[in-house]
Amino acid sequence: MRKVHVNLGKNSYDIIVENEILAKAGEHIHCAGGKIFVVSDTNVAPLYANTLIDSLNKAGYECELYLIKAGELSKNIQSICPMYEAMLSFGLTRKDLVIALGGGVVGDLTGFVASTYLRGVDFVQIPTSLLAQVDSSVGGKVAVDLAQGKNLVGSFFQPKAVLIDTAVLATLPDSFYIDGMAEVIKYGCILDKDLFEKLDSIKDRASFMEQAEAIIANCCQLKANIVERDELDKGDRMLLNFGHTYGHAVEKYFNFERVSHGVAVGIGMSVVTHLSEKAGLTAIGSAARLDKILTQYGLDTHIEADQDEIIANMANDKKNLGKELVIVLISEIGKSFLYPTTSEFFRECK
């Protein structure tokens, strides 16, 4: 077991990373009211909901399972009201608890609903995808999408705990494993050269799984360090968006269906690093090293698309500050910085 503490004063919590922690989740959860509303999706629930609920029942909690359809298209405003109504029907109060059991979509949507139901009810993240385990479950960013872009309606609402079971990764399809590796690689690029080089030395998924607990805890610690300095995403926390400006625009271009988040972020990291290297802002050779490791983990480095439309999609990016678009660049592998520019920076990738 590995534990990462996120020190945010009254909003502090622990991230516990342990193989097969799901079966004993009830030992790590406190709910004064006794009722727990578990949200999962149609892919994850058949695999893990019974294990979680059995553990919670043994701990004396009454549970209700609520399912959403798997996929990014469920993370929208229309999904919210039915969840509120189900919570009310269950009799959920502010002394009770909400649990997100699933990937990033489940975590983001559930966290946003928990942050607004009765003006806020406690929630716990139990992420089941690699991407959610190393990134979206940590830090309290909760949101839903609009037609104009990703995560445009949301809030900052920290979980009471994050329980990460590395055993669930064994059932991930390869596409989801590859998707999550984009975020793992991101941490190496922006904050930790040693992590980047460790990832470079891993040659297959089985070898990664042997080190999964340590690597995931490392990523969570890196994110916790950033969140503790900048909980509300006004400065350093924006570094975590490396590759995301272009990546989110790619996701929107394909209507959040054809290209997954991790694949889009991988493409975004490659595109922006080639451009920044060309502009003399990044050490020569960094883009080639990044492309090599992305390819090694099955991620794309470019995509055929209308660049004018992708650039237009950046107009609604959350990192727009007035007329400036703040993007994340790396000066070299393991070191990153914020760079104020505009979407025109990306014209050169045409």
Image: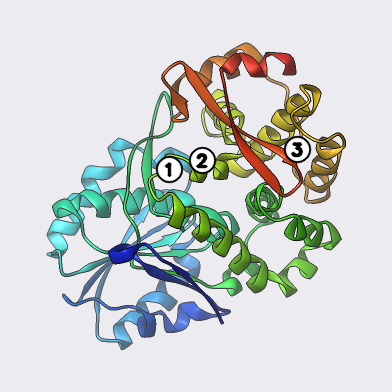
Q: CA distance from mark 1 to mark 3?
A: 28 Å
Q: Residue at x 45, y 53 (%)?
A: 229
Place of residue 162 in the rendered image (x, y in percent of width and height, measured from the top left): 43, 67
Q: Residue at x 46, y 82 (%)?
A: 23
Q: Find out whether the residues at labels 1 and 2 contact each other: C-beta distance under 8 Å.
A: yes
Quadrant of res 269: top right
Q: Which residue is mark 1?
A: 233
Point out the image quarter for the N terminus: bottom right
Question: 105 and 281: which one is in front?
Answer: 281
Q: Residue at x 33, y 53 (%)?
A: 111
Q: Which residue is mark 3?
A: 300
Name the side, left or right, on which 337 lies relative to 32. Answer: right
**Identity, as a three-letter code, of the amino acid under mark 1:** Asp
| Nearer-N-terminus badge (2/3) | 2
**Identity, as a three-letter code, of the amino acid under mark 2:** Met
Q: Which residue is mark 2?
A: 238
Q: How many circles with numbers are drawn on the protein? A: 3
Note whether 199 is above or below 309 in the view shown.
Answer: below
Name the side, left or right, on which 239 lies relative to 200. Answer: left
Q: Secondary structure at mark 1?
A: loop
* Crowd rating for badge 2 (residues with CA inside 10 Å; few <14, some 14–19, many 20+): some
* Crowd rating for badge 3 (residues with CA inside 10 Å; few <14, some 14–19, many 20+): some
Q: Residue at x 58, y 36 (%)?
A: 244
Name the side, left or right, on which 6 lies relative to 202. Answer: left
**Identity, as a three-letter code, of the amino acid under mark 3:** Asp
* Crowd rating for badge 1 (residues with CA inside 10 Å; few <14, some 14–19, many 20+): some
Note whether 234 is above or below 348 in the view shown.
Answer: below
